[in-house]
Image (spheres, rainbow, N blue to C red):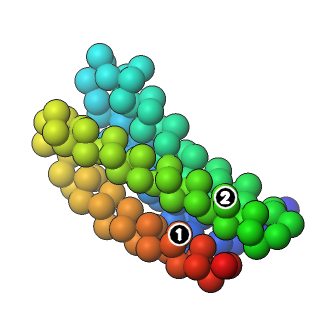
Amino acid sequence: MEYKFEKLEVWNLAMKFNDLSYKLADSLPEHEKFNLASQLKRACTSIALNIAEGSTSQSDNEQARFLSYAIRSHVETVACIRLMEARGYLAKHENVKQNFEVIGAELFNKLQAFKRAIN
């Protein structure tokens, strides 16, 4: 059985974004594993989960609310990456970070467009 959310382009993009976020989180030093890595993983996972949960909504307003949560989680994910950059943790992972930025920008735009289309 395929669920409605699995057919959504924005959800599939969120899954790619999640994979890149996990790669960057897993590259963090050991002392960041229970702080920044954990926060990054929870935030990026929340994007896909909120898209999925919103896809089962009974109303457009409810789905838009879950898309708002996904957008907030996206911004939190990007903020985690900016903290990693500021601390010099991403210097050896420029290729993954570059893909993160490209897919992240596309995801952000699609989330906002999807929310606007529903409203």
Left or right placement of residue 46 versus residue 35 in this view: right
Q: Is residue 3 left or right of residue 90?
A: right
Residue 39 figure quarter: top left
From the viewer's perspective, tell me whether residue 101 is left or right of residue 11.
left
Is residue 73 shown above or below 6?
Answer: above
Image quarter where the C terminus lies is bottom right
Quarter of the figure that contains the N terminus: bottom right
Report which residue position mark 1 lands on: 111
Kind of residue indicated by mark 1: Leu
Q: Residue at x 58, y 60 (%)?
A: 68
Name the residue located 47 percent from the left edge and 38 percent from the top edge: 41
Measured as percent of width and height from the top left, residue 113 is found at: 53, 78
Is 21 above or below relative to 102? Answer: above
Say which mark, if any, is on residue 66.
2
Rounded to the nearest angstrom, the CA distance separating label 2 from label 1 is 10 Å
On screen, residue 49 versus residue 21, left or right, reads right
Question: Can you see residue 69?
Answer: yes
Q: Position of residue 75 (x, y in %)?
A: 41, 53
What residue do we see at 41% from left, 47% from top? Answer: 77
Residue 80, given in percent of the width and then of the height, sits at 34, 41
Tell me the kind of residue under disc 2: Phe
SS label for mark 2? helix
Q: Secondary structure at mark 1?
A: helix
Report x, y in % for residue 116. Answer: 58, 79
Front residue of this view, candidates 77 and 31? 77
Task: Judge the density around disc 1: few (<14), some (14-19), many (≥20) Cα neighbours within 10 Å.
Answer: many
- Label 2, residues with CA under 10 Å away: few <14, some 14-19, many ≥20: many
Up the image or down, 41 lies above or below 79; here it is above
Task: Evaluate whether residue 15 shows in this view.
Answer: no
Residue at 76%, 73% (x, y): give it. 60
Tally of numbered discs: 2
